Amino acid sequence: MACSGDTFEMVLADEWGNKIHATCKRSLMHRIQRFLPLDSWGVIEHVNVSVVGGQYRTTNYKYKMVIAEDAVISRSDLVDDRSFLSLATYNEIESCEAKNQVFLIDVIGKVHELGDIQTVRVFGEDRKRVQFRLLDTEGNSLPCCLWGTYAELLEPFCETAKDQTIICLIRFAKIKEFRGEMQITNAFDASRVFLNPMIPEVMDLTERLSISDLSVALVEKTSGKKDGKRISYDWNNAEIKSISEIMDSNQVDYCKIVCTIEAIDTDWAWFYFGCNRHQKRVNKLPNVDYASMTKKDKPLFRCEICRSNISNVGPKFKLHFVVKDDSGTCTAMLLGSVGKSIVGVDAEELWDGSYEEIEDPEILPEPILSLVGKSFCFGVSITSDNVTNGSETFVVLEVCSGDKVYSIDSHSLSTSDMVTTSSTMSSGSIMMLDQVSSDECPTPITKRKEDLSDLQDLSSASKKQCSKIIKQENNKSG
């Protein structure tokens, strides 16, 4: 959303990801913001449609929506945190013709060669500017220049850029030719810039890039599939932190926490439907009665990665646990194969075969309910969504498993039902209560990292807090 002279401009998306440019008079701005705040869902009735034109168009749709005084705007109960990105590839940007430079794009990449924030004189005014390059997974790079408040977002990273990885997502970016090559820059105040946001595309890109800054090593997948290489974080040397420490963290990082699952956040369904090939979430198609269909019907869904309608889909774990230690409470989110590692079975085995929306999210499969009261060592990611936006949801990248009991030296957690292995715990911080020989140590689940691209629908600070949780008495005999 942005103001442009006497009008208020915005981009709206429907539940299938179709986007349209919308506009209204500036006098209606506060009314729109009240009933339809950013990243929320609403219903708009009685609108006009006109042909769109001009430079720097936010979508390639030839029409725009005009919201007039008589429009009726109300809140919607739809819950869907997908970003509906329309990411342009670097090859598409580099080969962009002049006629296509009128469209704003979404672009993502790893920040490389980050320069200092400079103050330059532009049209008689001092403006801040930062220049860097964006890298993709194929080794391609694009020059990028951000101005004003967008440049200031990168200011905290300038001194520490060599010590951490920064993934930058720019929504509604402008393409322009500069010194013989295509450059990415912000389009006035219309662009949105995110650094290390908790969204699937960022986690997938991070997983595919070789990030030596984070002391990671490339490892071949053991599944035998020729899907390239993935990144394995060095969890042996990862610091163990308390929940209060990660909640108060002021920098992007990864670490381990030892915690007890206190409850299950049922504001979210426990699974999503994803493409069996890419593990990415698929979208429902309009005019398809999914409520009346079962697994045998094999209905079609839209996969944006395959760029086609597919039927090879299945449920993927998306678990939200309220976890605690002696220092505090937060939400841990486990997806895909990480969720499977803690539940012990595939999501499809727990699925009832119906494509209908879950009516009562408090009804959960027993293998998920049985996790309440158990304790684990989780390898988690601290992202800019946590640092900047105050999100209390942390993505679990790793789960340790085993049958031996451990305790934190600081006694910050009860040792009951603690599940972990020595292979992913720092020996200086963990004391093993039951000594075992090295050949008795179980294999860590960390070796099953291939599905980090499962990440879909990550929560954000704008998501309403948990209002319904399921609790279960700690089963000491389990």
Image: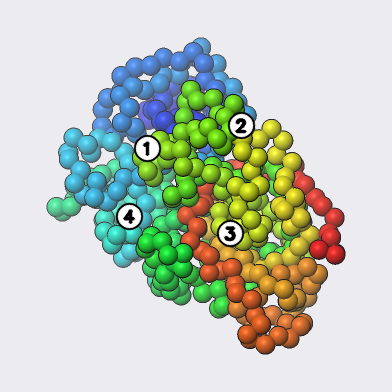
Tell me the residue at 31%/45% (across/down).
Answer: 88
Q: Residues within 10 Å of mark 3 (few under 14, many from 20)?
A: many
The image shows residue 408, relative to residue 152, as above or below, that is below
Q: Nearer the viewer, residue 234 or 143?
A: 234
Q: Secondary structure at mark 1?
A: strand
Q: Nearer the viewer, residue 213 or 232?
A: 232
Q: Residues within 10 Å of mark 1 (few under 14, many from 20)?
A: few
* Three-letter code for the amino acid on which mark 2 is drawn: Glu
Q: Position of residue 19 (x, y in %)?
A: 41, 30
Tell me the residue at 59%/26% (across/down).
Answer: 292
Q: Earlier in the sequence, mark 1 or mark 2?
A: 1
Quadrant where the C terminus lies? Answer: bottom right
Q: Position of residue 425 (x, y in %)?
A: 63, 77
Q: Secondary structure at mark 4?
A: strand
Say the numbered circle drawn on residue 338. Answer: 3
Q: Position of residue 459 (x, y in %)?
A: 58, 47
Q: Is residue 268 rendered to the left or right of residue 215?
A: right
Asked if the residue under mark 3 is in contact with the one under mark 4, i.e. CB atoms within 8 Å, the reply is no
Real-space Cα distance between discs 2 and 4? Answer: 50 Å
